[in-house]
Amino acid sequence: MTQEKLPLTEEPEGLEASTNSSDEIHPIKLLTRPILHFEASPKEHQQGLELFEACNKHDLDRIRILIEKQGYSAGFVTSSNWTSISLAAYNGDFKIVKYLLEIGADKMYIKAPNDSIDSDVLPAEISTSSDHENGILESCTTPLHWCCYRGHEDIMLLLLRHGYDPEAKDTVGNSCLHLACCAGKYTIVQSLLAHSVKANSKNDYGNYPLDLCITDACRRILARFLSQTSCKVCKEPFPRSRRPSLCQQCHNVFCGSTPCSSAINVAVLSIETSLTRSVRYCEECTIELHRAGDELNTILKQKTELIRQSVERMHPQSITDAQSAEQMGLDPSNSLEIQVDAKGTKWLSDTEILEALTLSQSDAEVLFTSIEIAQGHIAMDHTLLELGRTVYCQLNAHIHLQDAIQSLLKCRPLETRSKTKALEQSFTRAKIANVDSKMLEFTAQLIRCAEAECTLSGCYHLCSSLTRSNLHIQKFLKRLEASVEECQAFGVVSSLLDKAVALRDRLNAEIALEDSMKAFWKTEQGQYEFPDNSQVDTLLEALEARAHKMTTALNHASLCESICPNLVEECNNLVKQLKKEIREETKLEDERHRIREELASKPKKKSKKKKP
């Protein structure tokens, strides 16, 4: 069986126009009548070769244009009996084969008698031989031969549905089983035996299908099929009127009728097809099939529910009243404590999070084992298997994400950002696996919290080593304050946050003390000005204002821990000195006030004496 070499040809005139302006071309009658090569005109011969070229390029759109728009005949047959549909079947192009079958481009082939194969494994809408009673090609290589030889199971099932005979002979007497065996296509051999084809027919060279097997798998299953002469269940011998059928799961031979065996319709493997395949199963394997499917379905529900419960426990809850950690009965010294934001969202503590992370790798292994058992059945529901694989990927990603969260929480407080890398990587994989959105939202929040904690740790260690003489102390203090506010918004380890808040308050208090001790000066206008640009008119007011600032700073400093004692002592001494100066300045001010009053009263007395 050799494929005729097809010459490359130029695109026919008008093809581009028909593609770009298809609305201007009126559909014409489809030409599907078989045309043998010696009957074809040169134009029909050229058109047939152009159609073959489109089939070789898997170009369905061009094929439709050539047939539907330009009137090319789909029934051209070459001198070696190649047709458009046989070439498409050889190439394994399901869409083109289906299209050519729909328009009736295979009328040159003689279809099977209604009772030639086991109809129990084929759909009810199978084509009959009357549809092709005018077939002109006998003892030729049909599209079914080619797809069996090439191993295209989806096309084989499609052609069987349209009435092609799996026991038809090619030019040298080979059946489809002969060709599948000599090509080593195990799935095709198995499917043909399930369709109750004859396994002991000879070709023109006297070879049986078993003689042509090139793989051990094909040889074993065919030898087993031939060795069984009676049904495995009812023990009845197979008469000539009853053909044996292969169970495609256990590979035992049974009667081709219920209850010994039955056909199960499942979705075909190709995603591009809407075809269902009929699989032959014995009664025992059918029971095991349903049991494996039910078990997988149950485990899927269990694991999905476990994921939902875990996520619900970790997801922040909405509360009406802002409650503190003490009111919630939590230890405020060890973890990501209750934080309530402006929206009233309550974040959980580290302990609560760790308690919610209950899934383990064993949960994923249980699901994986169940999927392996289920996919061992070729008749298993394809949709259920896909769902199982999807849930397994999500569960596996969920568990890896959970482990990364646990590792992060156990090493808190965080000091370096490198500790968040594992969680970020797991988070990326979890997004790809479509892990629950609430889990992803929680993880994103935790990553932001961890980053804020790392920033806080760095700012804390930087500011804790600062001295009052540092010129950049205000800059570093602002950075610490911003980090504290960010952590308070996200919620971090409270011990670190408390230390940072205490350090911030101490530095602010010391800066306030130093600022309050700065002296004022007298301006050219006679006023007294402070470093903050505030002004007063008298020295007494300046002394009192400075004393008030220092007293306020001391009161605030008394609320903070670890304030520099020398600074506090210096400030206290200065306050005492200021109070003394205020008393002295008060006496002087009183004396000046008395003198001014006396001076103001003397002119009045003189004016009284001059009166007559």
Image: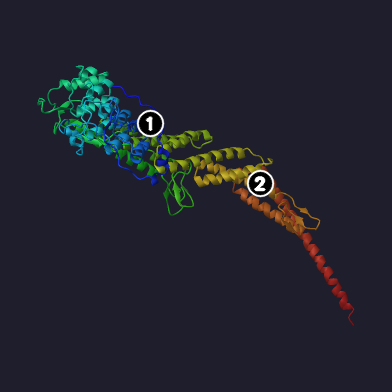
Residue placed at 65% from the left, 42% from the top? 473
Is residue 514 positioned above or below 94 on the image? below
Task: Using residue 258 as the reference point, say whether residue 170 is left or right of it.
Answer: right
Hey, what amino acid is under mark 2?
Ile
Q: Which residue occupies the extreme bottom position in the image?
A: 612
Measuring from the top left, give residue 14's x and y in whole percent. 41, 39
CA gap, disc 1 and disc 2: 81 Å
Hey, what amino acid is under mark 1?
Lys
Disc 1, SS:
loop
Q: Which residue is mark 2?
A: 511
Is residue 130 positioned above or below 505 on the image? above
Q: Which residue is mark 1?
A: 57
Of residues 433 and 171, the one drawn nearer to the viewer in this rendering: 171
Picture quarter with the N terminus: top left
Measuring from the top left, give residue 293's x and y in whole percent. 25, 36
* Residue 188 shows up from this direction: yes
Mark 1 is surrounded, within 10 Å at the Cα level, by few (under 14), some (14 to 19) or many (20 or more) other residues, namely few
Measuring from the top left, give residue 543's x and y in whole percent. 73, 55
Disc 2, SS:
helix
Is residue 88 positioned above or below 206 on the image? below
Q: Which mark is residue 126?
A: none
Pick whichever of labels 1 and 2 is earlier in the sequence.
Answer: 1
Task: Using residue 296 as the reference point, say whether residue 458 is left or right of it.
Answer: right
The quadrant where residue 241 appears: top left
Of residues 588 and 107, the one drawn nearer to the viewer in this rendering: 107
Residue placed at 86% from the left, 73% from the top? 603
Measuring from the top left, give residue 248's x and y in whole percent. 22, 28
